[in-house]
Amino acid sequence: MTRLLFWIALFAFGWWLWRKATRPARPVEKSKGDAPAAPMVRCAQCGVHVPQSHALQDENQWYCSRTHLEQDRTDRGR
């Protein structure tokens, strides 16, 4: 019984080596996650982080929307 298991294991190992040697190499794919991340800024009114390209700037403060920019202007005007 042990001999039979030995030969089965040896055959399976040989089969695995043969398949590995005859398969074509897979091309290395560049993952999409390698692109640099966009800089993020924090909204001065609500604290939500948004990409800098979508944010609005007033002086040195960043805002996620025109509404928050205007709310902060009125709050500072008091």
Image (cartoon, rainbow, N blue to C red):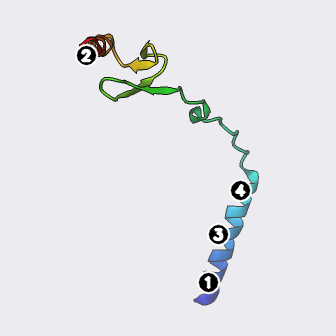
Identified at 68% across, 64% down, the residue is 15
Q: Amino acid at mark 1?
A: Leu
Q: Which residue is mark 3?
A: 12
Which of marks 1 and 2 precedes in the sequence?
A: 1
Above or below residue 48? Residue 76 is above
Q: Closer to us: mark 3 or mark 2?
A: 2
Q: Which residue is mark 1?
A: 4
Q: CA distance from mark 3 to mark 4?
A: 12 Å
**What secondary structure is found at the residue carrying circle 4?**
helix
Which of marks 4 and 2 precedes in the sequence?
A: 4
Q: Is residue 15 left or right of residue 56?
A: right
Q: Which residue is mark 4?
A: 20
Q: Which numbered tag is attached to residue 13? A: none
Measured as percent of width and height from the top left, residue 41 is found at: 45, 26
Which of marks 2 and 3 precedes in the sequence?
A: 3
Q: Which residue is mark 2?
A: 75
Q: Quadrant of residue 17?
A: bottom right
Measured as percent of width and height from the top left, residue 21 is found at: 76, 55
Looking at the image, the residue that sits furthest to the right is 21
